[in-house]
Protein backbone atom coordinates (compact mmCIF):
# COMPACT_ATOMS: atom_id res chain seq x y z
CA UNK A 1 0.00 0.00 0.00
CA UNK A 2 1.27 3.49 -0.83
CA UNK A 3 2.10 6.05 1.82
CA UNK A 4 -0.91 7.92 3.10
CA UNK A 5 -1.21 11.65 3.22
CA UNK A 6 -3.28 13.54 5.79
CA UNK A 7 -6.38 13.58 3.56
CA UNK A 8 -6.23 9.79 3.26
CA UNK A 9 -5.96 9.48 7.04
CA UNK A 10 -9.00 11.71 7.59
CA UNK A 11 -10.98 9.82 4.94
CA UNK A 12 -10.21 6.48 6.63
CA UNK A 13 -10.23 7.52 10.28
CA UNK A 14 -13.76 6.26 10.93
CA UNK A 15 -12.80 2.83 9.55
CA UNK A 16 -9.89 2.71 11.97
CA UNK A 17 -11.90 3.88 14.96
CA UNK A 18 -14.69 1.39 14.18
CA UNK A 19 -12.21 -1.47 13.79
CA UNK A 20 -13.05 -1.83 10.11
CA UNK A 21 -10.65 -2.02 7.20
CA UNK A 22 -7.88 -4.40 6.37
CA UNK A 23 -4.90 -5.05 8.60
CA UNK A 24 -2.76 -3.34 5.96
CA UNK A 25 -4.93 -0.21 6.04
CA UNK A 26 -4.81 -0.11 9.84
CA UNK A 27 -1.03 -0.51 9.83
CA UNK A 28 -0.58 2.24 7.25
CA UNK A 29 -2.82 4.58 9.27
CA UNK A 30 -0.90 3.81 12.46
CA UNK A 31 2.43 4.51 10.73
CA UNK A 32 1.21 7.86 9.43
CA UNK A 33 -0.31 8.87 12.77
CA UNK A 34 2.89 7.93 14.57
CA UNK A 35 4.89 10.39 12.44
CA UNK A 36 2.35 13.17 11.80
CA UNK A 37 1.54 15.38 14.75
CA UNK A 38 -1.59 17.05 13.24
CA UNK A 39 -3.13 13.66 12.41
CA UNK A 40 -2.18 12.32 15.83
CA UNK A 41 -3.98 15.27 17.45
CA UNK A 42 -7.09 14.61 15.32
CA UNK A 43 -6.92 10.90 16.15
CA UNK A 44 -6.50 11.49 19.89
CA UNK A 45 -9.23 14.14 19.98
CA UNK A 46 -11.62 11.90 18.07
CA UNK A 47 -11.00 9.06 20.52
CA UNK A 48 -11.52 11.31 23.54
CA UNK A 49 -14.70 12.77 22.06
CA UNK A 50 -16.11 9.31 21.40
CA UNK A 51 -15.36 8.23 24.95
CA UNK A 52 -17.17 11.29 26.33
CA UNK A 53 -20.19 10.78 24.09
CA UNK A 54 -20.43 7.05 24.76
CA UNK A 55 -20.07 7.46 28.54
CA UNK A 56 -22.91 9.96 28.91
CA UNK A 57 -26.10 8.56 30.37
CA UNK A 58 -29.42 9.62 28.85
CA UNK A 59 -31.07 12.51 30.64
CA UNK A 60 -34.47 14.12 30.63
CA UNK A 61 -34.75 17.56 29.09
CA UNK A 62 -36.73 19.98 31.28
CA UNK A 63 -40.23 20.63 29.97
CA UNK A 64 -39.61 24.37 29.51
CA UNK A 65 -36.53 23.70 27.37
CA UNK A 66 -38.40 21.13 25.32
CA UNK A 67 -41.31 23.55 24.75
CA UNK A 68 -38.93 26.33 23.57
CA UNK A 69 -37.19 23.90 21.23
CA UNK A 70 -40.44 22.73 19.65
CA UNK A 71 -41.68 26.30 19.27
CA UNK A 72 -38.45 27.31 17.56
CA UNK A 73 -38.55 24.29 15.26
CA UNK A 74 -42.14 25.14 14.27
CA UNK A 75 -41.12 28.74 13.42
CA UNK A 76 -38.13 27.61 11.36
CA UNK A 77 -40.12 24.98 9.50
CA UNK A 78 -42.91 27.47 8.81
CA UNK A 79 -40.37 29.90 7.31
CA UNK A 80 -39.01 27.18 5.01
CA UNK A 81 -42.39 25.88 3.85
CA UNK A 82 -43.30 27.50 0.53
CA UNK A 83 -46.72 29.10 0.33
CA UNK A 84 -48.76 27.73 -2.61
Image (cartoon, rainbow, N blue to C red):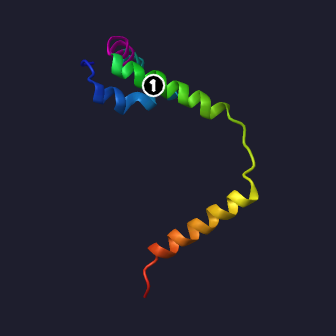
As drawn, the residue found furthest toward the bottom would be: 84
Please name whichever residue, 76 or 5, is drawn nearer the observer in this view of the structure. 76
**Can you tell which quarter of the image residue 32 is in?**
top left
The stretch drawn in magenta includes residue 10: no
The stretch drawn in magenta includes residue 33: yes
Question: Could you tell me which quadrant the C terminus lies in?
Answer: bottom left
**Can you tell which quarter of the image residue 14 is in?**
top left
On screen, residue 4 versus residue 66, left or right, reads: left
On screen, residue 53 versus residue 18, left or right, reads: right
Per the rendered image, the range of residues in magenta is 28-36
Say how many tags the image has: 1
Q: Position of residue 71 (x, y in %)?
A: 62, 68
Residue occupying the point 68% across, 57% down: 65
Q: Main secondary structure of the magenta part?
A: helix
Is residue 8 at all visible to an observer of this figure?
Answer: yes
In the rendered view, would you say 20 is above or below 33? below
Residue that carries the numbered disc 1 in the rendered image: 16
Amino acid sequence: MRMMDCRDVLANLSCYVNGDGSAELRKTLEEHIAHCRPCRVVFDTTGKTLRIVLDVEPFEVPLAVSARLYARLERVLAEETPVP
